[in-house]
Image (cartoon, rainbow, N blue to C red):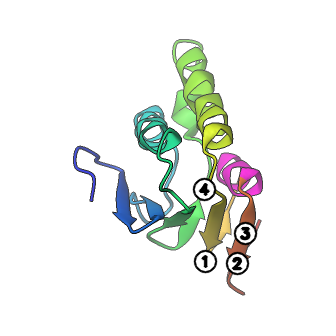
Amino acid sequence: MTEGYKDIRLEREGGVATLTLAKPPLNVLDIAMMEEMNRALSELEGDTALRMVVMRAEGKAFSAGVDISDHTADKVGDMIRAFHGIFHRMHLIHAPIVAVVDGAALGGGCEVVLFSDMVIASERSKF
């Protein structure tokens, strides 16, 4: 397990990395959490042994989206950079990314799911 994260977990076993959104119950994506996601995804970019990345979440939602408190004039630039960085880094990972969704994936959380290569969703999932 990779240490140094507050709102996510990054675990590796064999050729599989699991990135877990760990800010239940709704896994709202604030700037700090998105920066952690970017850092974790950056760690995976050059890993040639990586065969698959699984993105999942704790709590009752995959993610309720980007934190509305970050949609202010003084924060919006940092928020957009962090949010867009997630997709840039997902694109640079050569292994397939599978989003495992059990609950709501709303707004920016839905965008992260849709950018994945494959989605596995439970019957409880809402997009």
The image shows residue 30 at horizontal and vertical percentages of 48, 39
Question: Relative to 10, is 76 above or below?
Answer: above
Secondary structure of the residue carrying tag 4 is loop
Three-letter code for the amino acid on which mark 4 is drawn: Ala
Left or right, 120 with reference to 63 = right
Q: Residue at x 59, y 36 (%)?
A: 89
Front residue (pair 66, 91): 91
Q: Residues within 10 Å of mark 3 (few under 14, many from 20)?
A: some
> Who comes first in sequence, dot 3 or dot 1?
1
Residue density around tag 2, few if under 14, some if 14–19, many if 20 or more, within 10 Å: some
**Nearer the N terminus, badge 1 or badge 4?**
4
Disc 2 to disc 3, how far (Cα)?
Answer: 6 Å
In the displayed structure, 100 sits above or below 53; it is below
When asked about the image quadrant of residue 120, the answer is: bottom right
Along the viewing direction, whichever of 93 and 112 lies nearer the viewer: 93
**Quarter in which the C terminus is drawn:** bottom right
Instruction: Say if mark 2 contacts mark 3, CB within 8 Å.
Output: yes
Query: In the image, is 6 to the left or to the right of 75?
Result: left
Name the one closer to the observer, 16 or 39. Answer: 16
Between the residue at mark 4 and the residue at mark 3, the CA separation in whole angstroms equals: 17 Å
Q: Which residue is mark 1?
A: 102
Query: What residue is shown with label 2?
Result: 121
Mark 2, secondary structure of its residue: strand
As shown in the figure, which amino acid type bears the numbered disc 2?
A: Ala
User: Which quadrant, please, contains the N terminus?
Assistant: bottom left
The magenta stretch is 107-115
Give the side of residue 5 with respect to residue 12, left or right: left
Q: Which mark is residue 64?
A: 4
| Quarter of the figure with residue 53 | bottom right
